[in-house]
Image (tube, rainbow, N blue to C red):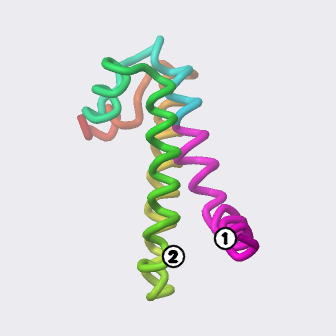
Amino acid sequence: MGYVRSSLGSYLYDIRFIILFYVIGDWASTFYALPFGTEYNPVPAMILEKYGIYHLLLIKIAFIVLLFYVAPVIKTSKGRWTLTKHIIESVGIFVTANNLMVVWYGISLVETLGLV
């Protein structure tokens, strides 16, 4: 039990920026941005429409749990684990920034870049 607790603590510290941007940042900024715009990503849009904003948070938490279980396989290559973390962190930063732009400026970074 002690090993699991220490490995979970180490894992959570290792993915702290994923938690900050991909989970908390994206979810909270989506929560505040929805009255000002539309969710363009079809998967979260479907979840939001059918189940609501809190189910989106549960799915993000489930993603973190799934990542915990597959991390040992990914970590067999240090470079692969670092790349995986940076990709997820970058997505989190991008979508959080996009959502904040919608709230603060009324424009979407995704639309501005022509991605939708």
Q: Residue furthest top?
A: 35
Residue type, numbered disc 1: Val
Answer few, some or many: residues within 10 Å of disc 2's Cα (few below 14, many 20 plus, some between 14 and 19): few
Whole-percent x, y for residue 114 in the image: 26, 38
> In the rendered structure, does residue 41 fall within the stretch colored magenta?
no
- Point 52% across, 57% down: residue: 89
In this view, 37 is above or below 55: above
- Point 30% across, 29% down: residue: 40
The disc placed on residue 98 is none
What residue is disc 2 on?
Answer: 82
Part of the protein shown in magenta: 1-26
Whole-percent x, y for residue 11 in the image: 63, 68
In this view, 101 is above or below 59: above
Q: Name the one closer to the observer, 8 or 48.
A: 8
Which quarter of the rendered picture does the N terminus lie within? bottom right
In this view, 53 is above or below 70: above
Q: Is residue 34 left or right of residue 49?
A: right
Residue type, numbered disc 2: Thr
The disc placed on residue 4 is 1
Q: Of label 2 and label 1, which has the lower sequence position?
A: 1
Give how far apart the Cα atoms at labels 2 and 1 are: 22 Å
- The picture quadrant where one finds residue 10 is bottom right
Whole-percent x, y for residue 57 in the image: 51, 34
